[in-house]
Each structure stands twice: as C-alpha cells, then as structure tokens.
Image: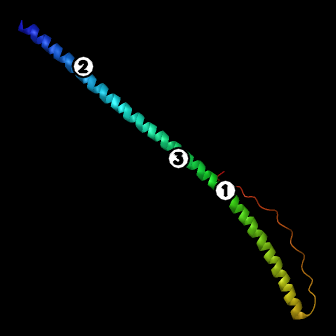
C-alpha cells in the first residue's frame, strides 16, 4: 500500500509543481509582454516627436533658403548699383582732371536671375 500512496504523492507533487511552474512562467511572460508593449508605445511616441521635429526643421530650412535667395538677389542688385555709381564717379573724376567729356562704355546686359535648386530636394 505504500507504493501506490508514494506514487500518488509523486504524481500529485508533479502536478502541483507543474501548475506552479506554469503559473510563474505565464506571469513572467505577461510581465515581459507588458514591458515590451510599453517600450513599443514609448518608441512610437518618440518616433512621432522626431517626425514632428523633422517637419519643423524642413519648414525652417525652406524658409531660410527663400530668405537666402532674397538676400542674394538684393545684394546683387546693390552691387550692380554700386558699380554703376563707381563708373559714374570715375568718369566725373576723369572729366574734371582732363577737362574734356569722356564717352561712357556701353552698359553690360542684365544677367538673368539665377535660380539654384538645392541638391537635397
């Protein structure tokens, strides 16, 4: 009678141990799944923040490119006017020094405004 009782005790202990092991493994699995889901959610939020920052940076870059082009055009126009004034002053100075009228050279043709495309677009 001892053998069947001992066998039954071993079987019951095995079942209880298996159940406890399964419960612990399931709990650990659920905790791992919850942790991974939380990390995924945080990563998605961070990705959205980075996308937003990237969009803001691209918008700012486009605005800076427009401003740069406007400033370049403005400076080119100012340089052209300064060169014209320098030529007029040089002719006036030469006229005053020599006492005779100097015929100005023909004005160079106006260059067409250059529109440069950004290589990153």
| Residue at left offset 33%, top offset 31% | 31
Spatial distance from mark 3 to mark 2, Cα to Cα?
Answer: 46 Å
Q: Nearer the viewer, residue 33 or 112?
A: 33
Could you tell whether 39 is left or right of 94 in the image?
A: left
**Residue at which label 3 appears:** 50
Q: Which mark is residue 45?
A: none
Q: Which mark is residue 63?
A: 1
Where is residue 38 shown, x and y percent of the image? 41, 36
**Residue at which label 2 appears:** 19
Could you tell whether 31 is left or right of 97 in the image?
A: left
- The numbered mark, 3 or 2, whose residue comes first in the sequence reads 2
Could you say which quadrant of the image residue 61 lies in? bottom right
Categorize mark 2 by other alpha carbons within 10 Å: few (<14), some (14-19), many (20+): few
Where is residue 78 shown, x and y percent of the image? 77, 72
Spatial distance from mark 2 to mark 1, Cα to Cα?
Answer: 65 Å
- The numbered mark, 2 or 1, whose residue comes first in the sequence reads 2
């Amino acid at each position: 009678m001892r053998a069947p009782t001992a066998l039954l005790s071993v079987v019951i202990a095995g079942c209880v141990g298996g159940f406890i092991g399964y419960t612990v493994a399931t709990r650990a699995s659920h905790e791992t799944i919850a942790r991974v889901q939380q990390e995924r959610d945080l990563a998605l939020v961070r990705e959205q923040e980075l996308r937003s920052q990237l969009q803001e940076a691209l918008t700012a870059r486009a605005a800076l490119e427009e401003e740069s082009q406007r400033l370049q055009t403005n400076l080119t126009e100012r340089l052209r006017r300064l060169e014209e004034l320098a030529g007029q002053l040089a002719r006036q100075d030469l006229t005053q020094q020599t006492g005779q009228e100097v015929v100005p050279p023909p004005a160079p043709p106006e260059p067409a405004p250059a529109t440069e495309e950004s290589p990153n677009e």
